[in-house]
Image (tube, helix red, strand yellow):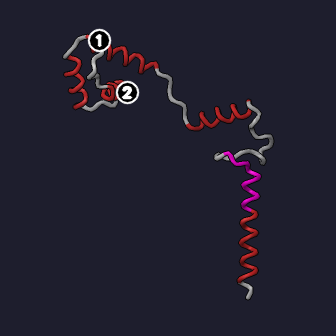
Amino acid sequence: MLDDDVPWQLLERYCSGDVTPEDAAQLESWLAADPRRRVLVERLRALFRRQVPRPTESDLERAWERLADALGQGPTHRWLGRTRGGWPRLLMVSVGVLVLLGIAWYLARFTAH
């Protein structure tokens, strides 16, 4: 039933409802070449309608946080928690303070002359 010239991208656009009139004409000509192709397309549409929605970025973040907690790698205190990049917040604050102290020292030392 499946031959090598299945227009998968066109079928995906058709099933998702993003088909243009040109796409529809191309699909109709492809379907007319073999009546069994209509069965394929209807099965694909049925599967596409039942498809589970893709998770959002916040869903993925929460899933990673739950996994980290389950593995014992999650934050123990809110202020000691991890930032998005995985760096502990306390380390990030410490680096920030050191940078500010370095700038203050530089300004005090070299601009006082």
User: How many marks overall?
Assistant: 2
In the rendered structure, the answer to whether residue 35 lies left or right of residue 15 reads: left
Q: Is residue 100 above or below residue 33?
A: below
Q: Secondary structure at mark 2?
A: helix
Disc with the residue nearer the chain's start (2 vs 1): 1
Q: Is residue 92 above or below residue 75?
A: below
Q: Check if residue 94 falls in the magenta segment.
A: yes
- Residue range corresponding to the magenta coloring: 86-96
* Residue placed under numbered mark 1 in the picture: 1
* Residue placed under numbered mark 2 in the picture: 16
- What percent of the width, then of the height, locates residue 92? 72, 55
In the rendered structure, the answer to whether residue 107 lies left or right of residue 21 reads: right
Q: Check if residue 105 falls in the magenta segment.
A: no
In the rendering, which numbered label is found on residue 23?
none
Cα–Cα gap, marks 2 and 1? 23 Å
Q: Is residue 109 above or below residue 26?
A: below
Q: Residue at x 27, y 32 (%)?
A: 20
- What percent of the width, then of the height, locates residue 69? 74, 33
- What percent of the width, then of the height, locates residue 103? 71, 72
Query: Which quadrant: the N terminus?
Result: top left
